[in-house]
Image: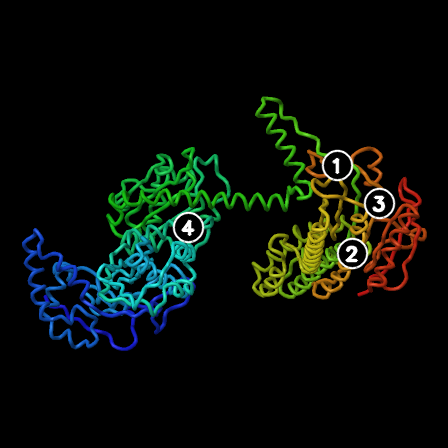
Amino acid sequence: MELDITIHNGADVLEAPIVFTDGRSAGGMNPFDIPYGTELCFGPVLKKIRTFIDSEDAGIRFLAREVVRLSKDSPELDHPIQELSVLDNHKDLLDMLMLFIIPPSDRETEFFKFSKPFNFAPIYMSGPMQSLMSMQDACYSFGGGLDIVRNRHIVFIGCFILQRLYGVDVDMTPSAMLTVNDSESGLNRFYKPEMNQKYIDVVPNGEIPDLSRKDIQRLLNNINDTDLWLKLLPADKFSFHGIHISHLFEVTEQESLSRIKQRLISRDAVLNIERVRELANLTRVHFSDKTLQLGLTAVDYPVSRTIDHEYRIKFNFLSEDVNRLTDEAYRSSVYDRAFRTRDVVLVDDLTALRKTTRLEKLLIKQGIRSLLVAPLLDQQKNVIGMVELGSPKVYGINAFMEIKFREIRGLFRTAVERSREYIDNRIEAIMREQYTSLHSSVEWRFTEAASNILERQDAGHPDAPEVIAFKDVYPLYGQADIVGSSRLRNAAIYQDLADNMRAGRYLLVRAMEHVEFPLIQQVIQRIDGHLKTGIDNFDNSHEIFWAEFIHQQLTPLIEELSGQHPEIADLAENYFSDLDIDLGLFYRVRSDYEESVTRLNRSLSDFFTERDQATQKTLPHYFEKYKTDGVEYEIYAGQSLLKNHHFSNVHLRNLRLAQLIDMCEATRLTTRLSQDLPMPLRTAQLIFAYTSPLDIKFRMDEKRFDVDGDYNVRYEILKKRIDKATIRKGQERLTLANMISIVYLNDKDREEYSDYLSYLKEAGYVDGEVEDLILDPLQSVNGLRALRFRVRE
């Protein structure tokens, strides 16, 4: 069999494109171009063949002697070949020589090529190799970026020099993968190259560099420093003569399995539809079946363990049609059998089942004929998930595939378990943050208490909960309250209900032109009676009464009339389109109000949270906020709250000043945001300057902190009552829009806060003069005073 050897002249060209992990491609360049000289030479091959002339194997001995005999007349083959035309004169010898490199029986089936040393442009490629390289989308991939791979190639050659000339045994095999898309199946196939350098000689150019053990160790410790390698092993000191042999071996099954493992390692491997699609494609490659389908879902079985994970990991075949596969209605289905037995269920022909449920019928409707259902079990043998393999062909899923699938079943179990834990942790974090959070400033104390309980449990003692209390903490209370929220809400309800009745009245008047229906007159009369009530006299009783009237009399009458008289159907359609689907009432003005309140509350809440997070970096403290018609919050600061920090009066003064600045910025935020709200809103800001320390205790029943002790309760009473405080004998509310009111108890507090306000005025926060006001008496409370100022916009 004759080998057609062709030398590529000019720039080296690789036989398949190359891509790197950094997304770059080689383009038209050769990323493996090296500064060392390389020459094609058959001398190393002939040298090896000469060792076989006395072989005990008669065939090898005969061929070796024949090659040696013929080579005596061709001494140029022992030396670097400069003129490529020389090869044309030695075809017979080269054919015999190649018998020692590649057996003839392998040339029609194996993937291999020859090239100059460390040069990837082929001199010869086997037929199968040429066919493979010519396939569309054939592509080499390397485990690193372009620069990294190029540098590693240089270091790899340096290691070859160390091994051959310095006796240093270093194994540094470059990793690469050839990906080819099979034109018949449409699936990727993977091939791994193996390099054979045994027919390459390192030829020193003069004296080789003298490397000490320290130099060699330095090289081995700096395998990413190509400049160092080229400095100690200069390119002008070495060249390479010989022939480089490369083989490709198909590793599709191993590589697809490796990639499946790699995908499933991620904690969110099965939470994203795109990731699941990648897994499905790799599974098709692994089983060499382009028609194979993969399904995956979380399952809780027995059903008594059911929790809401399935909505995040639900990619099974029937996810669009069936809510829960564990439902009792699907008992005796193939899924039920898999869950109950905790074992793989294989059905080679769904249409041949004697008894089917709705699930099997849905699968058949989807075109699935054979099916594998594999439950995924936790350590307690509970079902936590399920994998499906489906095929449109009868016997497309068979026992041999089941055996092969068992190899990867455990990988899917681990992925589902990790993803469920990931969801658990996120849900717990959200619950802690949104509903039952322990503020970070006091979490250490709860951890300490939990540890103490654990120790008592381990010792066999009763685990009575500890009292969590903090002494001598300073409160800072503030609120940004929507001005006139009750009045605005009441007006919005009135407007919607009145508009609802006016729209109904108009329709009924028009209906009287087409139909004689005495009840219409009565309902119109009642509408007119209701509308005599003005907005100032409208209260909750009117809201209930009017809504019942609309639900029970007005809307049913319009429904009846529109159904029997087409003449008013269009008017009725407009009426019904304006009704809220859930309430059955007009809900336009209220919707604007509630959206405005929600957006304003969210913005204020986010603002106060963000500002507190910044302040926490200066001094950890307890922070808690509440949303009502506006936002109110409470800060507790003191040494007892701190585990590893120091608290001083400087920190306290800084917190109080920061609170005032935050309130000014919150006022400005409301002004800016109000311009974009469906219904403009304004807020009035209130600060309670309670400067005495108090004790707080965690209330187990309410899961929140509250003041502790009879004396400290006075603080809570005052805090709740100042919100409605008035001045000037009830003529004016203390809290006004775009203003900040600071309620205080004594002159010492006034002096401290007046000092802060002097700074705020200089900083441009105060518009006009600061008022010093006396509050009207509150229930059981007298003598409170307040500082009030308008915030400059």
Foreground mark, 4 or 2, reads 2
Asked if residue 188 is positioned above or below residue 715 in the image, the reply reads below
Q: Element under label 2?
A: helix
- Badge 3 amino acid: Tyr
Marks 4 and 2 in Cβ contact (< 8 Å):
no
Mark carried by residue 470: 1
- Badge 2 amino acid: Met
Mark carried by residue 373: none
- Badge 1 amino acid: Phe
Mark carried by residue 315: 4
Residue named by callout 2? 663
Quadrant position of residue 714: top right
Foreground mark, 1 or 4, reads 1
Q: Element under label 4?
A: strand
Percent of width and height locating residue 793 = 79, 65
Instruction: Describe residue 484's horizontal placement relative to residue 242 as left or right.
Output: right
Foreground mark, 3 or 1, reads 1
Residue named by callout 3? 690
Marks 3 and 2 in Cβ contact (< 8 Å):
no
The residue depicted at 43 percent of the width and 61 percent of the height is 225
The residue depicted at 6 percent of the width and 63 percent of the height is 66
Marks 3 and 1 in Cβ contact (< 8 Å):
no
